[in-house]
Amino acid sequence: MCGKKNLKIITGIDNFNVDQVVEIAKAADIAGATYIDVAANPIIVREVRKATNLPVCISSISLQDLYSAALEGIDVVEIGNYDYLYDNEIVFSRKQIVSLAQEAIKLFPNIDICVTIPHTLLLNDQIYLSCQLEQLGIKILQTEGINIKSPIKSSSLTEFMSKAYSSLSANYAISQAVKIPVIASSGMNLVSASLAILYGASGVGIATSVKDCINIYAKSIYIQELMNSMKKNKTISPSYYLSSIQNVNNLVV
C-alpha cells in the first residue's frame, strides 16, 4: 500500500449494511483492488474478513471505535471521513487532528495509520499539518474534497471536477511537501482518478461511483476499468464515464 497507483474501495464510514459492504468487498477482491476501507465496526470487519483476503482499513474519528474494530484484525487504521461532522457544521482544527494522531499512534504502535487532511483548512495549513503528521510517524495521508451530495447529471467537465478539485489541488501541494503516500479521495471516478495520479497521488479512494453499479459483477467490471485507466495514465472523458456506468449495468442485468 506504499507504492503508486493503489486503489482503495470505500464502503462508507457510516455504512453498517453488512450485505452491501460484503458485496462491495467481494467485487473489490475479484477486480484486484489494493485494499478495502470499512466502518470501524467489529461485525463489519469480521464479515469482510470472511469474504476477502484483501487488506482491511477501518475509518472513524472515534479512537474507541477504531480500537474495538481493530481487535478483529485489520491492516490500516484511518482517522478520517468528516462528512457527517460537516453536515452538523463541526470542523476539526489542525491541533485536534494532531492530538488524535498522537493518541492513535499510542493505541496502534504496530499498525499503519492514515490521516485524512480536512479540506476545511486553508491549503497552507493542510501542508503544514501533513508535515507535522509525517514527523509524528503517520504512514499515509489522504486528501478530501468538498462534500457535494447531488448526483452527476451531465457530461460537463466542470461538474465532474467540482466534486474533486479541492482534493486534487491539495494532493498536488501535499505530495510535493512529504515523502509518505498521499491518497486522493472525494469525488473520485473514472474521470478524476487518472488525473489524481498525474497530480502526484499514490492512490485513489473510490466510494460512490462503485455503489452506483447495480450488483457485484457490475462493480467488479467497473473497478477493473478504473484500475486500467490509472495504470495507463489514461484520462477518461466525462461522457464516457456516464455511458460506462449504464453499459456495465446493462451488461450484467
Image (cartoon, rainbow, N blue to C red):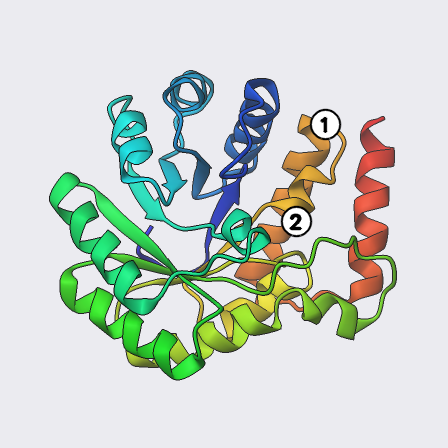
Give the residue at x 62% y 67%.
164
Q: Amino acid at mark 1?
A: Asn
Q: Is residue 74 left or right of residue 164?
A: left
Q: Is residue 15 left or right of residue 136?
A: right
Marked residue nearer the N-terminal end (2 or 1):
1
Q: Which mark is residue 215?
A: 1
Pinpoint residue 46: horizontal percent, then vertical percent: 38, 18
Rounded to the nearest angstrom, the CA distance separating label 2 from label 1 is: 16 Å
Q: Who is closer to the viewer here, 116 or 228?
A: 116
Which residue lies at the image location 67% right of the left edge and 57% below the top edge? Answer: 190
Picture layout, residue 19 above or below residue 171: above
**In the rendering, at what x and y percent does residue 43 appear?**
41, 17
Q: Position of residue 88 (x, y in %)?
A: 56, 51
In the image, 30: left or right of 222?
Answer: left
Position of residue 202 relative to residue 112, above or below, is below
Amino acid type shown at disc 2: Glu
Q: Nearer the viewer, residue 62 or 233?
A: 62
- Which quarter of the rendered picture does the C terminus lie within? top right
Identify residue for label 2.
Answer: 225
Crowding around mark 1 (Cα neighbors within 10 Å: few <14, some 14 to 19, many 20+) is some
Q: Which residue is the extreme one toward the bottom?
A: 124
- Can the viewer see residue 10 in this picture? yes
Q: State if disc 1 and disc 2 touch (CB < 8 Å).
A: no
Q: Secondary structure at mark 2?
A: helix
Question: Residue at point 50% right, 31% down?
Answer: 29
> Is residue 110 in sight in this rendering?
no
